[in-house]
Image (tube, grey):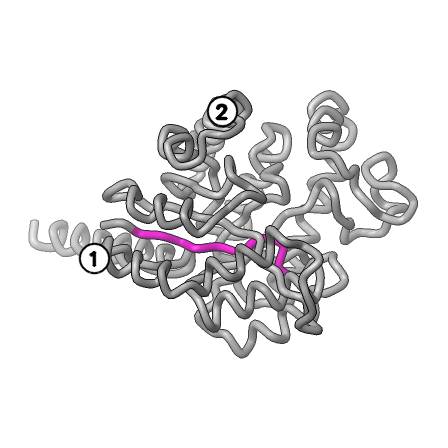
Amino acid sequence: MKALIIHGDDFGRSPQVNAGILHSHRCGVLTSASLMVAEPACGEAVAAARDCPDLDLGLHVVACNGRSLLPARHLRGLVDGQGFFPRSEVWAGFRYMFNRRLRDSLRDEFRAQIERHLELVGSLSHLDGHHNLNLHPALADILIELAAEYHVPYFRLVREPVITTLALAPDHALRKVRDYFLFRWLSARSRRKLQERGLKGNDWTFGFLQTGKLTERYVLGVLGRLPENSVTVFYFHPALEASHQPPRWLSQSIETQILTSDNVRAAIRQHHIQLTTYRALARIKASYEQFQGLRSHTTLTES
């Protein structure tokens, strides 16, 4: 089996991002998206998603380059006076690692983001992070604890087969290898924590090492090389101008075109790839566990 979640990040950030994700789902192969619950277009995104029952919505946890949900006065030192986190994920990561006093505020903010998502959507199948900060050790510990508390079954890990990416896109090889080893370690650490809590993560990821530089050729190459017997997440950042004028974000408009490409659809069929969602995987897992429980009960009864 080659199970593939085709995912859109940043849902709710702007009307343009919302339009790209919805178009990529309705007219393309995108199956999943994650919601930024404190951003200005969040309400519009949720309202539109109600007409797309097959679009699985997770939470895109924000701790950098975005707004907080709680008022700035409750998060002193964590956000600025307007409620914005640091723009740089590197600077934010250093602050969260070395300033332990911020962690209680982070926990309060993350809890508020989860509860807002549940209020808006009604369910929550997975957590991921803006700029993948959900894997930062200080943040991952908090988020995995909250995921267990709120029964969120899946947590996005970033484990990209670097050999595959370099074979298809050899540019910036040193940076890609560096980022591969860093996030491989971070994801392995988070996977251990998830297993301790009975939660799951995806096996593989694409879209990380080639962020902002995705091409149809690269995507088709990945689809032809997906790992067997695994769950892979391929994440994108699609967008469209709501006015249908030339997009301001060229790379994001290209990603929307890729996600609605007939060539991509054909490759999915050709390589016998099963498109899925975190929500569907969680239901399969729950059904399997229920079956195992019934079988154990039957065995004990017969004994």
Side of 240 relative to 66 (left or right): left
Q: Is residue 160 visible?
A: yes
Instruction: Looking at the picture, tell me which residue is in the foreground, 143 or 290.
Output: 143
Residue 173: assigned label = 2
Amino acid type at mark 2? Ala
> What residue did someone put label 1 on?
294
Identify the secondary structure beneath mark 1: helix
Instruction: Looking at the picture, tell me which residue is in the foreground, 160 or 213.
Output: 213
Q: Which residues are magenta?
A: 3-11
Quadrant hosting residue 283? bottom left
Q: Residue at x 66, y 72 (%)?
A: 244
Q: What is the residue that sits farthest to the bottom in this orientation?
A: 51
- Spatial distance from mark 1 to mark 2, Cα to Cα? 51 Å
Give whichever of discs 1 and 2 has the lower sequence position. Answer: 2
Foreground label between 1 and 2: 2
Place of residue 83 in the rendered image (x, y in percent of width and height, measured from the top left): 85, 48
